[in-house]
């Protein structure tokens, strides 16, 4: 089987190298607008060869789209026009707009929408690893709109990646990721900006930064090329959760202004319930 | 030498077990209002024996205060009244109020104020480890107000803990920790509360939570007994940074509301500068 990886960055590169190790008979063909990334992916052995998008699509049975979601949105309808019976895997981090854009396409069934809940704050082929997906969650979105054979092909690949699976519709997916992924990035961006601003007048401010600070701010290393389109496509949901988060912070501010330490204690105690979720 | 550890939790227990390993001739005497913690610390071998505060103070040359900062504030003046020539190490996470409370005490010089920038979201003796401090920063606060011999004793202990050192005054310390430690806890508390609230209507919301979410929210596991007094004592600085952080988030909200994606891109790009600080 030939597999095309369109976008050989962190996610695409990790899919490529993991499948190359697991499926010896598979040929991995990489596609990337960024020539230097494609060259690096070849040198690192993530892919077997590089090709143009058209050539890769025509030669492969399975085509992974692991590019920013704005590129998926503009590329996917044209790709569906081109393919015969191939399977296209949309691995984007947002789903509603993309699903809407292909809803009425006669070849809609050839698309499997899957979002691997895995990633790091790093990007590019250098960041690719074979253990990025292991034990993580693969979210299948609107799976009933995929042809059964297309879904089965992707599901056997998900098994090779050693991932758990869950199913939801595009609306649910976008709401949930706003709450447990996208907002975390915004708080990190804002925290980084807050402290970088203070550094201008205080100089030594980062000398005391420990693991707690690093933990809450590390997502601020994330790529603007990947994340700006995500926030654009999931704008309404992100605005909702951001508003609720600001409200929570304003409540903390008020409680502290009023020196209501009983309320402050209860607020921390209540947030401790997150222990139930985190390992 | 006998060393007293007043408060055998995460920090006190970790000091105890590390010094027990490094300084074979040293006897570690534990003190804790919580009898079950004291018993656990004994069973785990963190301390050699337990004792009352008075007995421990009278028998030890060095007394570590590793208790919540409100307890340090109320206990320290009375301890200074009691000691002869012993050294008291204030390991609290806030400094201005505590330093002010002992500023005019005739035995002020026997206190060394040190804040180890180390910790985890866990608490209690079970959380103690021998590698908590290694390679981390010990901040000496108002060190010129400590007697030279008292400071030298503490500095040789810091060396045993294999920590780096830095010096600042109490005001600087409290401002800096507000920016690179205390605010990180507040954003985690608020993020946990935001998503826990959403769970009530959405149910499955945590199914998609990955390492990014965990990273930004793990500090919400922190103990309210330890943290409420910290926010009480560092209230003004925390309110300042919290206000600035809310302003940054409101700016993100505005940019997204106006669909100004160029500004959004630049905002992420600017926050990426945090790479300079984080490893």
Image (cartoon, coloured by chain):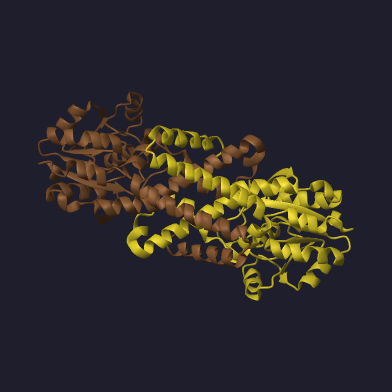
Chain colours: A yellow, B brown
The answer to which image quadrant residue A35 occupies is: bottom right
Whether residue A202 can be seen here: yes
Q: Position of residue A49 (x, y in %)?
A: 72, 71
Q: Nearer the viewer, residue A78 or B130?
A: A78
Whether residue B28 can be seen here: no
Q: Nearer the viewer, residue A18 or A74?
A: A74
* Residue at the image point whose x is 28% and y is 34% from the top: B71
Q: Position of residue B73 (x, y in %)?
A: 25, 37
Up-down relation of residue A272 to residue A106 (above or below): above
Up-down relation of residue A152 to residue A195 (above or below): above
Q: Quadrant of the C terminus of chain B?
A: bottom left
Q: Nearer the viewer, residue B252 or A107?
A: B252
Up-down relation of residue B272 to residue B149 (above or below): below
Horizontal placement of B173 versus A90: left or right?
left
Up-down relation of residue B107 to residue A88 (above or below): above
Q: Position of residue B19 (x, y in %)?
A: 27, 42
Q: Residue furthest top?
A: B35
Q: Quadrant of the N terminus of chain B?
A: top left
Q: Position of residue A30 (x, y in %)?
A: 71, 68
Horizontal placement of A120 versus A262: left or right?
right
The answer to which image quadrant residue B106 occupies is: top left
Number of numbered callouts drawn: 0
Horizontal placement of A169 versus B18: left or right?
right
* Residue at the image point whose x is 42% and y is 36% from the top: A264
């Amino acid at each position: 089987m030939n597999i095309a990886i369109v976008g050989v960055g962190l996610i695409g590169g990790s899919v490529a190298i993991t499948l190359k190790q697991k499926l010896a008979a598979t040929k991995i063909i990489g596609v990337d607008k960024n020539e230097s990334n494609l060259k690096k992916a070849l040198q690192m052995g993530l892919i077997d060869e590089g090709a143009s998008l058209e050539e890769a699509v025509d030669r492969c049975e399975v085509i992974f789209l692991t590019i920013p979601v704005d590129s998926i949105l503009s590329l996917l309808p044209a790709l569906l026009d081109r393919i015969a019976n191939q399977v296209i895997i949309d691995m984007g981090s947002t789903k509603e707009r993309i699903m809407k854009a292909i809803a009425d396409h006669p070849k809609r069934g050839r698309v499997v929408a899957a979002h691997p809940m895995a990633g790091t704050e790093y990007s590019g082929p250098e960041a690719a690893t074979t253990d990025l997906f292991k034990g993580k969650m693969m979210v299948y979105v609107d799976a009933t709109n995929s042809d059964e054979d297309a879904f089965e092909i992707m599901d056997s690949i998900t098994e090779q990646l050693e991932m758990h699976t869950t199913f939801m519709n595009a609306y649910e997916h976008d709401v949930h990721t706003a709450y447990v992924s996208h907002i975390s990035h915004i708080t990190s961006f804002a925290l980084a900006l807050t402290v970088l601003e203070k550094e201008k007048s205080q100089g030594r401010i980062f000398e005391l930064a420990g693991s707690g600070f690093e933990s809450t701010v590390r997502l601020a290393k994330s790529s603007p090329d990947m994340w700006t389109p995500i926030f654009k496509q999931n704008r309404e949901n992100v605005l909702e959760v951001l508003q609720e988060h600001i409200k929570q912070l304003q409540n903390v501010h008020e409680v502290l202004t009023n020196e209501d330490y009983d309320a402050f204690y209860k607020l921390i105690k209540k947030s401790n319930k997150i222990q139930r979720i985190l390992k």
